[in-house]
Amino acid sequence: IVAVVPGKGAIAVFSPRLDEAGNSVKAQKVIEYVTNKLDFNLFSPRSVGLKGE
């Protein structure tokens, strides 16, 4: 799975177990975790940074 936030960054993750749609189950969880920690949001004008800093 590749996730891109224009002007901020990108992440690519793979894990063998796939869901019914053919997406990597663990990769989805990793991307969700990382994007939440870094406050990556496609619609947010804020710059990237760790929450609480």
Image: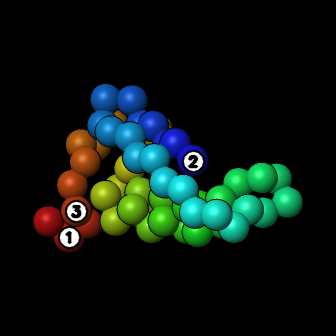
Residue 50 numbered mark, or none: 3
Label 1 belongs to which residue? 52
- The amino acid sitting under disc 2 is Ile
In this view, which residue lies farthest toward the left?
Answer: 53
Tell me the distance, in whole angstroms, between the alpha carbons under discs 2 and 1: 28 Å
Who's the residue at 24% across and 43% down the image?
47
- The amino acid sitting under disc 1 is Gly
Evaluate if marks 3 and 2 touch, with contact meaning CB atoms under 8 Å apart. Answer: no
Binning the other alpha carbons within 10 Å of mark 3 as few (below 14), some (14 to 19) or many (20 upward) gives few
Evaluate if marks 3 and 1 touch, with contact meaning CB atoms under 8 Å apart. Answer: yes
- Nearest the camera: 1 or 16? 16
Q: Quadrant of residue 53?
A: bottom left
Who's the residue at 57% across and 47% down the image?
1
Q: Quadrant of residue 14?
A: bottom right
Q: Earlier in the sequence, mark 2 or mark 1?
A: 2
Mark 3 lies on a secondary structure that is loop
* Total numbered badges shown on the rendered structure: 3
- Nearest the camera: 17 or 19? 17
- Is residue 21 visible in the rendered image? The answer is yes
Mark 2 lies on a secondary structure that is loop
Residue 1 numbered mark, or none: 2
- The amino acid sitting under disc 3 is Leu
In this rendering, which labeled residue sits more in front, label 3 or label 1?
3
Evaluate if marks 2 and 1 touch, with contact meaning CB atoms under 8 Å apart. Answer: no
In this rendering, which labeled residue sits more in front, label 2 or label 1?
2
In this rendering, which labeled residue sits more in front, label 3 or label 2?
2
Q: Earlier in the sequence, mark 3 or mark 2?
A: 2
Q: Is 51 on the left-hand or right-hand side of 31? A: left
Mark 1 lies on a secondary structure that is loop
x%, y% of residue 39? 35, 56
